[in-house]
Amino acid sequence: MNGFLKAVLKTNETMQVIAGVALTFIILLTTIDVVLRAFGRPVSGVYEIVAMAGGIVIGFGVPLTSWKRGHIYVDFLIQKLPAGKRDAVNIITRCIGIALFLMIGWNVLRIAGSFLIEGEVSPTLQIPFYPIAYGVGFSFFMLSLVLVCDIVKIVGGDYE
């Protein structure tokens, strides 16, 4: 099972790198656009590109953030419970999260498929929407795997 956890972590770290590159790209593109606007030569389609790259940043960044438990987490009530009950609550919430994110991921992939079939593209630059939608759908499945890993760690006694 340790190999499974390492594989999920490695995939999430790779996704985090992609999210970081996309965020850097957004910053550079926005800066270039602001400077060029001062000279009356704005970059065409910046809004579209930033929106799509933002989907990558958020979608690809969330699974590793969840792995590291970097989200705001209010656990003062749960910490007062005995270890067994605390583990049960954590497992139940992870199961609910897995079901939720699997449904969301499935629906996002269905939307991505319709984007592909319909040929949906951005209005200005004609960039196809489906690759970003597939990427975001994949990230929901990875988030579900992170929650499965949490359950494995809880059952194995390695959850902090």
Image (tube, rainbow, N blue to C red):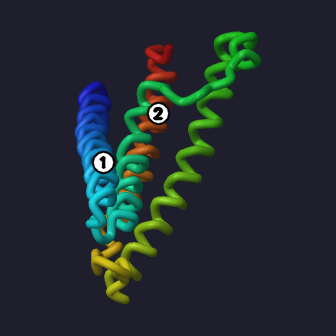
Image spot of residue 3 (x, y percent): 24, 29
Query: In the rendered structure, which amino acid carries the disc numbered 1?
Result: Thr
Q: Any mark on residue 31, and which?
A: 1
Q: Which of 64 and 46 is in front in this view?
A: 46
Which residue is disc 2 drawn over?
Answer: 66
Residue found 46% across the figure and 65% down from its top:
106
Q: Does the rendering let one see residue 134?
A: no
Residue found 26% across the figure and 47% down from its top:
28
Crowd class of label 2 (few under 14; some 14 to 19; many from 20; radius 10 Å): some
Image spot of residue 74 (x, y percent): 68, 23
Crowd class of label 1 (few under 14; some 14 to 19; many from 20; radius 10 Å): few
Q: Residue furthest bottom?
A: 118
Quarter-of-image position of residue 91 = top right
Image spot of residue 17 (x, y percent): 24, 38
Q: Does residue 129 lie above or below 156 as drawn?
A: below
Query: In the rendered structure, which amino acid carries the disc numbered 2?
Result: Ser
Quarter-of-image position of residue 129 = bottom left
SS label for mark 1: helix
- Sooner in the amino-acid sequence: mark 1 or mark 2: 1
